[in-house]
Amino acid sequence: MSIDARTPSGEGLLATAGRYARLVKYKFVIDFLLTLVIVATILGVDGLTADGVPLTLLFFALGMIGVLSAVMTLDDVTGAEDGSDTANYVEVEDTALRPLERKPLLTGELTVAQARRFGHLSLVWGVVWWTLALVVTPHPTLGVAVLAALLLFLSVQYSWGLKFSYHGLGEAVLLFSATAFLLVPYGLATGGLPIVVLVQGLLFGFGQVLIAGYSNTNDIPGDAAAGRRTVAVLTSARGNRVFLGALTAVNLLLVVVPPLTGAAPWWFALVLAPFAVLRIRQYTGFLRTGDPLVARSRGITTFRTVVACMIAFNLLYLFL
């Protein structure tokens, strides 16, 4: 299949929108937008309705859609151009755990030129709305502004531009970016970043890294051939297992350390317990079967579970 095949003519707006929605991995964009739900439950009604906060969060959300769309789109542009996506999706057996239809550049439904243009426009959209969010925030602080700027810069450079994921820094960039997608809107709304918010941001960030880590494990041959230096490519199979185990252990420490240090109430760990069980199941299952795509699928479920647990904790904290 040619990655430069032209978009079929005569199709309606809905079909076109569907192709671009799959290009940006709309389900993952929705997952990232859950950071705003978490922030809303931390703020509560009083925080959400404070002067300037609704408009600030609205502008951030609109920009966030653009930035995430740019990140996902430009990642696919790079993958199509260097052949890594062809190796990882076309030249392997199609699977329901990661179907080819997620890649409209590979199925010929969109061209690389169309995707690149869409990615650039999405990035401009994101920059405009985030700039407005910084202008209207009721609590302007230099620290949050710098964090937002770093988030914008680093997230889009994941596999485009400086291509951090091609130089052994992809996992670190992803952890920072996913975490900052929660910290920045909270900081814009309040001007502060308490430890409990940082912990929830990191739980969100590790959720994404422990999806990508197993995805990268599956993609070792294609990534290596394309020069994409993920941890999975750079280490041995044993080293990669140790790396994923270390990430899992640190992720679980984020559940138990805050209550032990007084940064969160004792029942924080109790509310997060379902997530912890699923995270352990993900890693031990991978050690037992060696199937990275099953572990990746379990990681998505685990990620959405930790989001639900954090929302539950925040709501309980508001009313207890």
Image: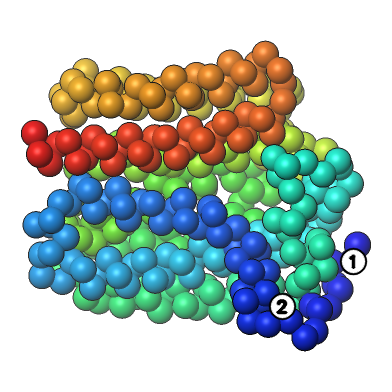
Residue located 18% across and 20% down the image:
266
Q: Residue 114 bears which disc, if any? A: 2
In this rendering, the answer to whether 109 lies above or below 156 is below
| Colour basis | rainbow
Q: Quadrant of residue 257?
A: top left
The residue lying at 82 percent from left, 44 percent from top is 94
Left or right: 275, with 26 as reference point: left
Foreground pick, 7 / 219: 7
Percent x, y for residue 206?
46, 36
How many numbered marks does the figure carry?
A: 2
* Rendered view: 281 above or below 303: above
Tag 2 or tag 1, which sits nearer the N-term?
A: 1
Q: Quadrant of the C terminus?
A: top left
Residue at x-position 56% and y-position 79%? 121
Visible in this render: residue 203?
Answer: no
- Residues marked 1 and 2 touching at CB (< 8 Å): no
| Residue 91 place in picture, x, y as percent | 89, 46
Residue 190 or 228: which is nearer the viewer?
190
Q: In the image, residue 54 lies at what x, y percent?
A: 21, 68
Is 319 placed left or right of 1 in the picture? left
**Label 1 neighbourhood size at 10 Å, few (<14), some (14-19), many (20+)?**
few
Q: Which residue is mark 1?
A: 2
238 above or below 40?
above
